[in-house]
Image (tube, helix red, strand yellow):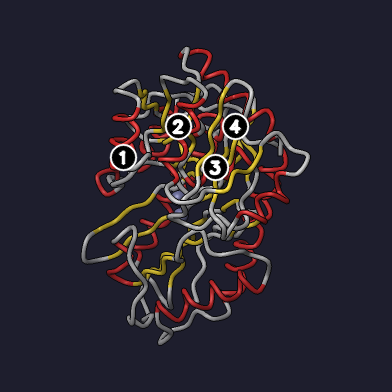
Amino acid sequence: MDVAARIEGVRRRLADDMTPAAVVSVTSNLKYVTGFRDVIDRGINAACLVTEDETLFYTDGRYFEAARSAAEGGPWEVRLQKENLYVELCEELHARGVTSLMLEAGVPYGRFKFVSEQFRGAVRVVDRLVEEMRQIKENEERDLIAQASAIADRGFEHILGVLAPGVTEAEIALELEYFMRRNGSEEMPFSPIVASGPNSARPHAIPGARALAKGDLVVMDFGARVGGYCSDMTRTIGVGAVSDELRRMYESVLAANAAGIEAVRGGRPCADVDAAAREVLRKTGLDDCFTHGLGHGVGLDVHETPTVGPKSTESLRVGQIVTIEPGVYVGGTAGARIEDLVAVEESGCRLLSHAPKEFITV
Ligand code: ZN
Ligand code: ZN
């Protein structure tokens, strides 16, 4: 992890904006710029102050020692937050004679208001201060995501032996989570989605007490986490004999998934990649049932930029890792989604999801 280069990236943005200091406070951005990821939990009072020549990571007594050992020999230092993080940050900056400041767009409004008052409004709130850099994965990051993806592949293989009529969605979700945790995954990047029968028409259904029944499609969307990095994959299977209509739905989604993957390469507009998959569904009259974008970036967070959708204005860049996940949802009946993780390369992409995609019935 090239933490020094990441901090330099923040400094370049400061120089471009002629602003003397930035506060990084979004949790996954803090993890990214410091490489210190083990013990930052959600909602923690922590922030990183980046100036031209210093990077100070403020944290409280719960994390101080761990952060200090992580910082040893590195390009950032740790400061113990005593009472109020933002009061102390502003005092530090005022003591240095700093009169303007850059904040991230994700900063809570109350904190923004306080800092803005302290700096008499000389506060710039910027989008993607760190997220822009996070899009392009270092080799080490890509390897961690590939490892997380391999655990999910094994999770799929394992769950095929568990799926049967009568087993509930909640039982399947729990088994997936248990298996992946037992096989090297850290905390789940998101709760596995297991949606059967009519529930499969809800893209982000919550697994419940419904038992699998013959004729169902079952959508399973899940990922693992290794070294803080996430994977994300969806597979759809059938239970017993599935109607021809649902089978055709599956094959259309599979063809759209293949077309999307085929369209990926560095420099390609994201909207074109989305369109390539959507066009396949249009030919079978199912494009109206594809109600979300084709994909998204994955990294420290399961949903990152870029967005690969019909309204995207960006182009793919070599080093990004994105999902390709077309889905078709017919309310009250069924849905199907097939999601793969791919690493964007110069002339195509490298597939990081390897679980089988031919139609499987249990
Ligand atoms: Zn997913
Ligand atoms: Zn996804």
Which quarter of the image is occupied by the N terminus? top right
Direction right: furthest residue: 73
Q: Amino acid at mark 1?
A: Arg
Marker disc for residue 30: 3
Residue 188, how many percent across, how many down? 53, 63
Instruction: Look at mark 1 in the image and give the residue it sits on.
Output: 282
Q: Quadrant of residue 112?
A: top left
* 88 left or right, relative to 156: left
Measured in 3D between alpha carbons, the distance from the residue under mark 4 to the one under mark 2, in whole angstroms, is 18 Å
Q: Amino acid at mark 4?
A: Ile
Q: Secondary structure at mark 1?
A: helix
> Is the residue under label 3 in contact with that under label 4 (CB below 8 Å)?
no
Mark 3 Cα within 10 Å, few/some/many (few <14, many 20+)? many
Of badges 1 and 2, the one in the foreground is 2
Name the residue nearer the viewer: 227 or 158: 227
The structure residue drawn at horizontal position 31% and vertical position 47%, both measured from the top left corner, is 290
Q: Earlier in the sequence, mark 4 or mark 3?
A: 3
The structure residue drawn at horizontal position 41% and vertical position 20%, both measured from the top left corner, is 100
Q: Secondary structure at mark 2?
A: helix
* 6 left or right, relative to 280: right
Instruction: Look at mark 2 in the image and give the residue it sits on.
Output: 273
Of badges 3 and 1, the one in the foreground is 3
Instruction: Look at mark 4 in the image and give the residue it sits on.
Output: 136
Q: Earlier in the sequence, mark 1 or mark 2?
A: 2
Direction front: furthest residue: 95
